[in-house]
Image (spheres, helix red, strand yellow):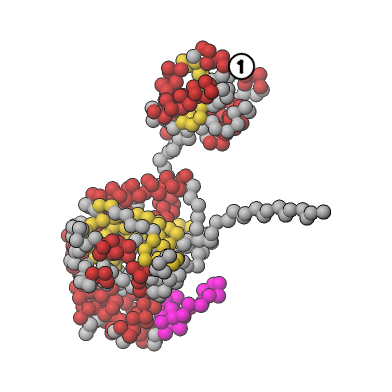
């Protein structure tokens, strides 16, 4: 007897960790949000550009999050010519490559924006994904701090264009040259200390998340999180830690400017950074942006190593409820800064650049909390039902559907098993369809269609007590000539819209 053939195993449907599927509501919310951002960028004279999802890994170079070897912080694969390629970690390094490759054709200063997904090969967690969208704006070829000041102003205008009122956001500004001066002052200058400096930067960048004591641990021996994972620290001495914490703890720049100048005394780079901060403060104030919108704040670091001058961060200041039910300040939704060395790596000559990046997914969550997103109503399609399956009837149903679409009305013809009409109405109910179009043989012979107002029908159905009354009432259903289909459907949709507006 032959052995019974084994049944093939079903493939298990599973989403990779750290990735999410997006539904229609989220997609529409992102589209609405990015349209508002794009409008601000265009008003400032920026033009769009698009770079691919993958770059040669060496184009990302030492600016990877952890090291310069593939698959450390990025997702990488080897091409058939043995070259390593990686999914982009951010949108800035690809822009630098694009500028360098097309340098002779690009008009400098090059003012550009782009939106797209970026990928991080990191441990996923609550609110921490491996794929997420960023929306960047950059100016390449402008060396003066006026370009950085403009970025901060555009950042502030973007927040307000998204409906975030003053007092609910602030653009915080610092300068990496000042921090470099502080690090030089505590003995961490020079190439030999590049790794230690990067560890310090990453520790300071966690100030909002872990607070001063958490940063103290990361500047020292290290920190163990709630899961037991241990992060090695920068191993600074106690006096070094105190100077760093003093610097990032400055709350009022005007009051602490003298102390800060003293802290970076002897460091030309640090003194230059202080002067640039003063210039940015003057420029934004002259343009009408007060400290409640753009504020000098030495605690801003930005973790990536490629920043070389001013750095900035957009922070939302209202409270939200986290997954533990605690009220917390929402925090950062984007940031950026000056990165004069990034394009230069390809060029062998100085190419100044500055820009900022908005975390689209995170900002979308904030806007939903504020009720500023997803308020635009999207009406479900009108459903053209199918009563008969012959080709002539089907052609007529399709004609009705296309006629509605041509008039700018969302419509679909039922594509399931048409023989069970009750299932079509159940489908319309699940889709929250506002109207059903019905035509059987009798209506076709008379050249009419039945238009059923499904929203009004739901309301009236609660007032009818038995099937006889239901049949006699023919709830919210009218018969109209085929030629009047579009007009009557539009009238019903407008009446439904008025009812929704009154209900708000």
Residue at 43 percent across and 47 percent down: it is: 27
Residue 102 or 232: which is nearer the viewer?
Answer: 102
- In the rendered image, the quadrant that contains the N terminus is bottom right
Residue 404: image location, x then y, percent: 43, 27
Residue 91 is left or right of residue 344, and the answer is right
Q: Return the residue at label 1.
A: 472
Residue 418: image location, x then y, percent: 59, 28
Residue 377 or 100: which is nearer the viewer?
Answer: 100
Count of marks placed on residues: 1
Residue 334: image location, x then y, percent: 35, 61
Label 1: few (<14), some (14–19) or many (≥20) C-alpha neighbours in 10 Å: few
Up/down of 47 relative to 145, above or below = above
Residue at 21 percent across and 85 percent down: it is: 266
Residue at 29 percent across and 64 percent down: it is: 97
Magenta range is 207-235
Residue 207 or 130: which is nearer the viewer?
Answer: 130
- Is residue 110 something that shows in the picture? yes
Up/down of 234 relative to 403, above or below = below
- Is residue 109 something that shows in the picture? no
Q: Quadrant of residue 462?
A: top right
Residue 290: image location, x then y, percent: 24, 60
Residue closest to the far front: 1
Up/down of 250 relative to 24, above or below = below
Q: Which secondary structure lies at badge 1?
A: helix
Residue 214: in magenta span: yes
Residue 360 is left or right of residue 380, and the answer is left
Residue at 55 percent across and 56 percent down: it is: 15
Residue 166: in magenta span: no
Residue closest to the far right: 1
- In the rendered image, the quadrant that contains the C terminus is top left
């Amino acid at each position: 007897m032959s052995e019974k053939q084994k049944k093939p195993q079903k493939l298990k449907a599973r989403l990779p960790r750290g990735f999410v599927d997006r539904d229609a509501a989220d997609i529409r919310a992102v589209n609405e949000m990015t349209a508002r951002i794009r409008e601000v960028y265009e008003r400032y004279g920026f033009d769009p550009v698009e770079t691919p999802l993958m770059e040669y890994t060496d184009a990302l170079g030492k600016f990877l999050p952890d090291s310069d070897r593939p698959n450390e912080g990025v997702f990488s694969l080897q091409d058939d010519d043995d070259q390593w390629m990686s999914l982009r970690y951010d949108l800035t390094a690809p822009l630098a490559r694009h500028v360098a490759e097309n340098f002779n054709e690009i008009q400098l200063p090059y003012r550009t924006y782009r939106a797209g997904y970026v990928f991080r090969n990191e441990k996923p967690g609550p609110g921490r994904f491996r794929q997420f969208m960023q929306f960047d704006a950059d100016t390449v070829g402008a060396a003066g701090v006026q370009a950085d000041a403009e970025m901060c102003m555009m950042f502030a205008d973007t927040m307000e264009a998204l409906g975030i009122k003053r007092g609910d956001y602030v653009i915080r500004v610092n300068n990496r040259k000042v921090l470099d001066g502080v690090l030089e002052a505590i003995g961490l200058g020079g190439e030999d200390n590049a790794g230690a400096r990067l560890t310090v930067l990453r520790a300071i960048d966690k100030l909002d998340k872990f607070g001063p004591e958490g940063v103290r641990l990361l500047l020292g021996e290290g920190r163990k999180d709630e899961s037991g994972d241990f992060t090695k620290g920068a191993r600074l001495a106690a006096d070094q830690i105190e100077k760093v914490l003093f610097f990032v703890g400055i709350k009022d720049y005007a009051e602490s400017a003298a102390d800060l100048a003293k802290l970076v005394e002897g460091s030309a780079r640090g003194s230059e950074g202080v002067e640039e901060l003063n210039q940015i403060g003057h420029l934004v104030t002259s343009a009408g942006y007060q400290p409640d919108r753009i504020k000098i704040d030495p605690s801003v670091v930005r973790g990536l190593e490629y920043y070389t001058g001013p750095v900035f961060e957009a922070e939302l200041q209202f409270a939200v409820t986290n997954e533990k039910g605690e009220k917390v300040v929402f925090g950062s939704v984007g940031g950026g800064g000056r990165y004069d060395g990034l394009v230069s790596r390809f060029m062998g000559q100085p190419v100044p650049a500055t820009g900022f990046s908005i975390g689209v997914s995170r900002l979308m969550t904030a806007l939903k909390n504020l009720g500023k997103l997803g308020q635009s109503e999207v009406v479900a399609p009108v459903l053209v039902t199918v009563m008969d399956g012959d080709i002539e009837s089907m052609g007529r149903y399709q004609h009705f559907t296309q006629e509605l679409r041509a008039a700018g009305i969302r419509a679909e013809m039922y594509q399931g098993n048409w023989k069970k009409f009750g299932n079509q109405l159940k489908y319309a109910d699940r889709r929250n369809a506002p109207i059903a179009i019905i035509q059987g043989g009798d209506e076709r012979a008379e050249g009419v269609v039945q238009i059923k107002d499904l929203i009004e029908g739901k309301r009236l159905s609660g007032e009818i007590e038995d099937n006889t009354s239901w049949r006699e009432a023919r709830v919210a259903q009218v018969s109209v000539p085929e030629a009047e289909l579009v007009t009557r459907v539009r009238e019903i949709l407008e009446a439904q819209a008025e009812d929704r507006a009154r209900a708000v």
